[in-house]
Image (cartoon, rainbow, N blue to C red):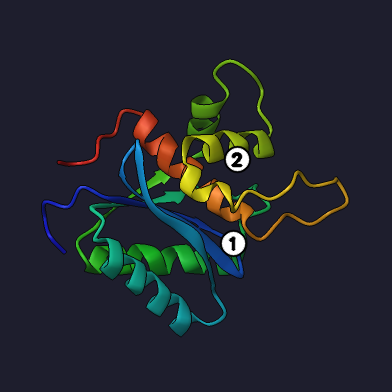
Amino acid sequence: MTSGSNRIVAIDVRPQRIGFAAFESAARILDAGTRKMKSPDLIAKRIACLIAEFHPSVLILRRIPPTSTRHRPRTRMIQRLIRHLAHRSGIAVVLIGERELQDCFQRNARLKKHEIATLLAKQYPEIAWKLPEKRKIYDREAWSMVVFDATALGIAYLASGHQIKV
């Protein structure tokens, strides 16, 4: 890891997968995608690969309150593992809460999750092809929506006044 790294990687954790978005600046996304997370060994390998590939100076994770439906033992375990690997690599970890996400995207209107994803797809054409169709209330969330959740975490981090080190 180079100390002059100017990249951030935002990771949104789900029990069976993560979404990630790697940024070089607020205007430039390097890559975004999903990774399956079946076993702790596989989780460690996949996170280590993301760190090795992008050499971030900061990892962004979602702060999950105890009252959230995301607050599950497996999700907490994955986040602990990510924080441990980041610490071992000398990478800072920043937690972004729901309030910061709302403040970033809800300035003028109450946007729904798919509307935020659509805005992000317009801002970053390189991930637009991953935008799923708007889901019906009886459908499960699309697998690729986690990519847009991770991208939103990165944007919230940058919009909150944090700067990528240059």
Position of the N terminus, as image quadrant, is bottom left
Identify the residue at image location x=62%, y=62%: 72
Q: Is residue 166 above or below residue 14?
A: above
Residue 105 position by quadrant:
top right
Identify the residue at image location x=37%, y=29%: 160
Identify the residue at image location x=46%, y=81%: 42
Picture coordinates of residue 135 (x, y %)? 79, 47
Identify the residue at image location x=23%, y=69%: 88
Separation of residues labelled 2 and 1 (CA atoms): 17 Å
Circle 2 residue = 117
Is 18 left, or right, of 8 in this rendering? right
Q: Using the image, tell me which numbered label, if any, was put on residue 123.
A: none
Question: Given the image, on which type of amino acid does mark 2 rest?
Answer: Ala
Task: Give the camera-side residue of 80 and 57.
Answer: 57
Task: Give the camera-side residue of 152 and 131.
Answer: 131
Circle 1 residue = 14
Picture coordinates of residue 122 (x, y %)? 54, 35
The answer to whether residue 98 is visible is no
Q: Secondary structure at mark 1?
A: loop
- Mark 1 residue crowding within 10 angstroms, few (<14) / some (14–19) / many (20+): some
Residue 156 position by quadrant:
top left
Q: Is residue 87 above or below residue 6?
A: below
Picture coordinates of residue 93 (x, y %)? 32, 52
Is 74 left, or right, of 162 in this rendering? right
Picture coordinates of residue 126 (x, y %)? 47, 48
